[in-house]
Amino acid sequence: MERKGFKMLSVKNLCQSYKNGNEVYHTLKNVSFEIQKGEFVAIMGPSGSGKSTLLNCISSFIPYDSGKITLDGINLTNLAEKEIAEVRNKRLGFVFQDFMLLDGLTVFENVCVPKVIQESPYKPMEAKAKKLLQMFDIERIAKKYPAEISGGQRQRTAVARSLMNDPLIILADEPTGNLDSRSSEAVIQAFIEAKKQLQATIFMVTHDSISASYCDRVIVMKDGQIHKEMKNRGNRKVFLDQLLNIFKDLNGGDGNDVD
Ligand SMILES: Nc1ncnc2c1ncn2[C@@H]1O[C@H](COP(=O)(O)OP(=O)(O)O)[C@@H](O)[C@H]1O
Ligand SMILES: [Mg+2]
């Protein structure tokens, strides 16, 4: 906990656009925010508001027009391709909506993948994987294959995998998007454990207000801009009500499903 309050991610005046013939579509318009070490932050907003684009800019999967992204003091803007790959493999953790597990590998082997890629020694890798499997209550299924386990177990496997390299930040795009509410909650609890036990920093896109209500802070995007930032003051139910109200205003809908 010693570095809690330390600035982990800083995004400053980020602008991104797509060109389609002569037309330019601005996806991100001057987006600025910070995330502290050990924070669990959700990003919400209507479909097409730029959430995935923002995540992909942070992981340098897509280029941007201007602005600056800094991770743990490393200026990610203008890094060479080789350095970007290094940051992605060693310093970032990813969790995707469709899990992205390798079907031919067991749960244990999937969790080990980030270390295997780095040709890390077996013993410490095994110890680390076991610890993570235990933490997320998937130790019993370590020898099973993805096809043999539930969606919630698959996603908890993916969360364990994302932590194998002690990433500076975990980027998760709709990690509960394919899960029922019970499995979703188990995945959110896995993030909360990672935050508590490993001081993990998590940045998660979600359109589920219930999932977001477990976060420390929610950044709401609209039309490529930050519409609002909301802080969880400690009472989850109160925070959930605030989130539902925001989205009622934003879509004129029931507030729970922003997309
Ligand atoms: N490769 C692309 N080419 C052109 N437009 C894109 C591309 N990817 C996304 N967009 C557009 O950028 C906007 C933001 O998309 P996205 O970041 O995926 O939104 P969100 O994740 O919030 O639903 C959308 O209008 C989308 O159509
Ligand atoms: Mg998206």
Image (spheres, helix red, strand yellow):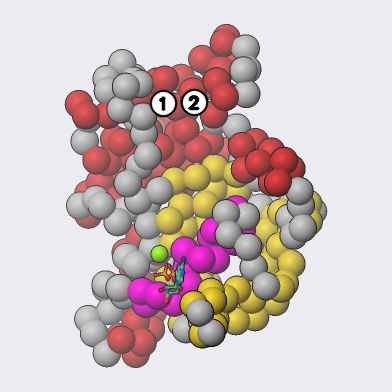
Figure quadrant of the C terminus: bottom left
> Is residue 60 placed above or below 88 in the rendered structure?
below
Amino acid at circle 2: Val
Residue 164 magenta: no
Figure quadrant of the N terminus: top right
> In terms of image quarters, where does ligand 2 lie?
bottom left
Looking at the rendered structure, which numbered label has been put on residue 59? none
Looking at the rendered structure, which numbered label has been put on residue 110? 1
Q: Nearer the viewer, residue 250 or 233?
A: 250
Residue 183 visible: yes
Q: Is mark 2 within 8 Å of ligand 2?
A: no
Q: Which residue is mark 2?
A: 113
Q: Residue 18: where, in percent of width, then height?
A: 53, 74
Q: Residue 85: where, in percent of width, then height?
A: 66, 41
Q: Residue 58: where, in percent of width, then height?
A: 61, 58
Residue 199 visible: no
Location of residue 142 by image quarter: top left
Q: CA distance from mark 2 to mark 1?
A: 5 Å
Q: Residue at x 27, y 20 (%)?
A: 144
How crowded is the residue under tag 1: few (<14 C-alpha within 10 Å), some, or many (20+)?
Answer: many
Q: Residue at x 49, y 77 (%)?
A: 20
Q: Nearer the viewer, residue 192 or 225?
A: 225
Q: Residue at x 34, y 82 (%)?
A: 247
Question: Label 1's element?
Answer: helix
Q: Residue 25: where, in percent of width, then height?
A: 51, 81
The region drawn magenta spans 46-59
How crowded is the residue under tag 2: few (<14 C-alpha within 10 Å), some, or many (20+)?
Answer: some
Residue 49 magenta: yes
Give left or right: position of 222 versus 28: left
Give left or right: position of 22 versus 10: left
Q: Residue at x 55, y 66 (%)?
A: 54
Cβ–Cβ under 8 Å for marks 2 and 1: yes
